[in-house]
Amino acid sequence: MSIFDKVKEAAFNQFIEVIEWLDDTQDTILYRFPVAGQEIKNGAQLIVRESQVAVFVFEGQVADVFGPGKYTIDGGNAPILSKLGAWKFGFNSPFKSEVYFVNTKQFTDMKWGTANPIMLRDNDFGVVRLRAFGAYSMRVADPREFIKEVAGTNAHFQTEGIDTQLKRAIVTEFSDAIGEMKIAALDLAAQYKEMGEAIRAKINEDFKTYGLEVTKFYVENVSLPEEVEKALDKRSSMGALGDAQKYMQFQAADALRDAAQNEGGGAGLGAGLGAGFAVGGQMANAFGNAGQQSGGLSQQQTVACPSCGKQNAAGTKFCGECGGKMEVTKVPCVKCGAELREGAKFCSECGSTQEKEKCANCQAELNAGAKFCNECGTKVEASS
């Protein structure tokens, strides 16, 4: 190769450049192309791939943005030249410019979560503390705004550089949205999709200022405090059993089974047997109490109403059927002296009528066994 050819090749290599970015990462949002001395020669080749844009920054200002395609910067076909100024000296005067490649693809599976519980007023539990987490996808919607507001002069900007700021905005909007929607804590799981759409709309209002857009937002879980979840589990178990007494028996049976499965030797075996006996006694008491309660209800004493004969619980003062007085006053039989219910017409012992005898002279009622009338003193003739 002659000296002239070497000079020609060196000049060609000096003036012709290829400006492109091959992304080998998964989380790079912005990459600044390393231009020597920030000088770009006339005739440089600019290659922008799909899901990329190239942004030229001249003297601190965004000059132009190029979408996917191949461009030759020759002073005529690139819009940037009209903004950066004319080529006054041809190949001898390259222009200085920074070239940033912005990744416009969707960055998926970005995580978010509440660092601290969110206080919420709930109709079922009163004031509760909720925690939530999920994932979202985002992309750069406005490369100009992203460079001006976020990336600045960074040569290499990744998602972790803005992840913390985005999470703060997401949690703030999540707290605001869940408060406005007023969904009961027990109904939140059925509203995850609706919540995600409502929160995404709110977040995008904030992300516009960064040149970003949230394309997907997912609420994966909203959890109650541990003590509330345990109370709910117990309530569900009792609801499944349907009876508190049966639930107690179920617990006693579980405890007895666990004690029987404890196969420790020596003192452990004795302790296991002792626990088994104790639990067995508790279970027997539980079953016994249940039987006594059911038996007591069925064998409760009743008393017939003196007036209508209706059976009433012992101790009742008035009959539930006729309203008659349940208390009975005892009186002696007019003939044999046996105790009879007040108002009885015949003695249950001797069968004598209980109608009092009357004085033959004045018709006044005579007391049982009286020999003379209390009113007129007439001698009472003994009845046969």
Image (spheres, helix red, strand yellow):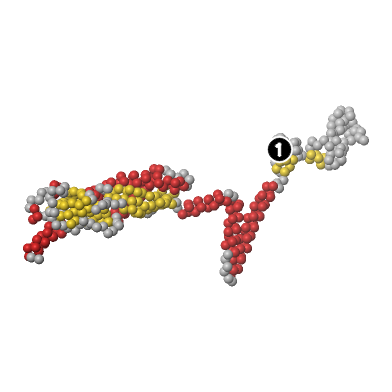
Question: Which quadrant of the figure has residue 345?
Answer: top right
Q: Residue at x 90, y 33 (%)?
A: 380
Q: Amino acid at mark 1?
A: Cys
**Residue 240 visible, this orientation:** yes
Q: Label 1: which residue?
A: 319
Q: Residue at x 69, y 47 (%)?
A: 298
The image quadrant where one finds the C terminus is top right
Residues 52 and 152: in front is 52
The image quadrant where one finds the N terminus is bottom left
Question: Which quadrant of the figure has residue 258?
Answer: bottom right
| Badge 1 density bin: few <14, some 14–19, many ≥20, Cα 10 Å | many
Task: Estimate the x, y position of residue 53 in percent, counting from the top left.
Answer: 23, 51
Q: Residue at x 50, y 51 (%)?
A: 232
Residues 340 and 227: in front is 227
Question: Which quadrant of the figure has residue 306?
Answer: top right
- Reply above or below: 213 against 352: below
**Residue 152 visible, this orientation:** no
- Reply above or below: 324 against 200: above
| Left or right: 272 in relation to 116 | right
| Left or right: 65 in relation to 373 | left
